Amino acid sequence: MTPEQWFPEQRDVGVDRRFHTLLQESFYHAYCQLDIKISEHKMLHWVAMRIAAGGIPVLPLFERYDGLPALLNERSRYIREWVRVFYATLFIEEDRQLLTSCSRRGTIV
């Protein structure tokens, strides 16, 4: 599957506004119906992550997505529904060089 197939220009007819395709929405509903547990939110510690990455600054990688660093730093801003939608719409290319979700398109968060 390509990013263009996962995020088509036109949304599928009748699909919930949080999703672009019926496949994404179906994945979300299956995920919820199976009651797949989501780990409790843990705050990220940027200094520890930089050390773990061998001194490479990781914060700029997260700053590409508006609001993501704040979401990962503040327990009160964690909204489980947003996390479920994020994972239901997440696209990872086979070579893992591209990671994107509907939030990139302004659909969530």
Image (tube, grey):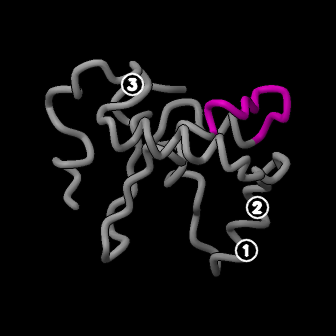
The picture places residue 77, in percent across and down from the top left corner, at: 76, 27
- Seen in the picture, residue 19 relative to 101 is either above or below; the reply is above
- Seen in the picture, residue 88 relative to 14 is either above or below; the reply is below
Gap between marks 1 and 2 measured at Cα: 6 Å
Which quadrant of the figure contains the N terminus? Answer: bottom left
Is 93 in front, or is 75?
93
Q: Please, what is the three-letter code of the amino acid marked with disc 3?
A: Gly
Residue that appears at 64% across and 81% down: 54
Residue interval drawn in magenta: 73-83
The picture places residue 8, in percent across and down from the top left corner, at: 18, 37
Is 71 in front, or is 52?
71
The picture places residue 9, in percent across and down from the top left corner, at: 14, 31
Q: Main secondary structure of the magenta part?
A: helix
Q: Residue furthest bottom?
A: 54
Q: Which residue is mark 2?
A: 47
Label 3: which secondary element: loop
Q: Which residue is mark 3?
A: 106
64 is within the stretch colored magenta: no
Q: Please, what is the three-letter code of the amino acid marked with disc 2?
A: Val
Q: In terms of sequence position, does the residue under pointer 3 or pointer 1 come before the other?
A: 1
Residue that appears at 82% across and 46% down: 41
Q: Are marks 3 and 2 in contact (CB under 8 Å)?
A: no
Q: Which residue is mark 1?
A: 51
* Discs 3/1, front: 3
Q: Local crowd at mark 2 within 10 Å, few (<14), some, or many (≥20)?
A: few
